[in-house]
Image (cartoon, rainbow, N blue to C red):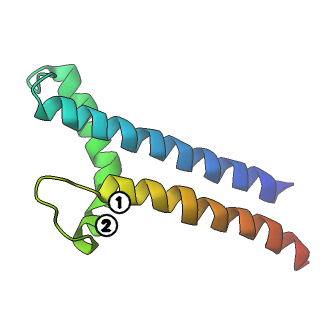
Amino acid sequence: MPLLALFNILMMLIQIFEWALILYCVVSMLLGFRILDPSNRFVYNVALFLSRMVEPVLNPVRSILPQFGALDLSPLAVLLGLRYIVAPALFQLLVVLPSHR
């Protein structure tokens, strides 16, 4: 039972990070197209918070991926990795660990 609770917490954290990453991409696009004003204190604080939350994960991925000019594919790679590698691996651990008792 505690293992299931830990699994649920980890999956919830992954989902929160996925949403933060999507929001980060949207906010950075809106800032780039000058739809949002970075001199607005609230917009600045939201962008700074999201940046500090996702950049530590995106930077190592950026160093691995090839450059495509102004197109940054690292958020897509991280989302796909979380969705199709990390989440299934956690599920497999949930299935395998109780059987080793």
> In the image, residue 49 lies at what x, y percent?
29, 38
Q: Amino acid at mark 1?
A: Val
Mark 1 or 2, which is nearer the eye?
2
Comparing 53 with 34, the one in front is 34
Q: Give the quadrant of residue 39.
A: top left
> In the image, residue 72 lies at what x, y percent?
22, 55
Q: Quickly name the residue at label 2.
A: 61
Which residue appears farthest toward the front when viewing the image?
A: 68
Q: Is residue 29 above or below residue 98?
A: above
> In the image, residue 73 lies at what x, y percent?
28, 57
Q: Is residue 75 above or below residue 39?
A: below
Which residue appears farthest toward the bottom when viewing the image?
A: 100
Q: Is residue 88 above or below residue 20?
A: below
Q: Under tag 1, what secondary structure?
A: helix
Q: Under tag 2, what secondary structure?
A: helix
- Residue 8 falls left or right of residue 52: right
Q: Amino acid at mark 2?
A: Val
Quadrant location of the N terminus in the rendered image: bottom right
Q: Is residue 37 above or below residue 1?
A: above
Q: Quickly name the residue at label 1.
A: 57
Q: Give the quadrant of residue 60.
A: bottom left
Q: Are marks 1 and 2 in contact (CB under 8 Å)?
A: yes
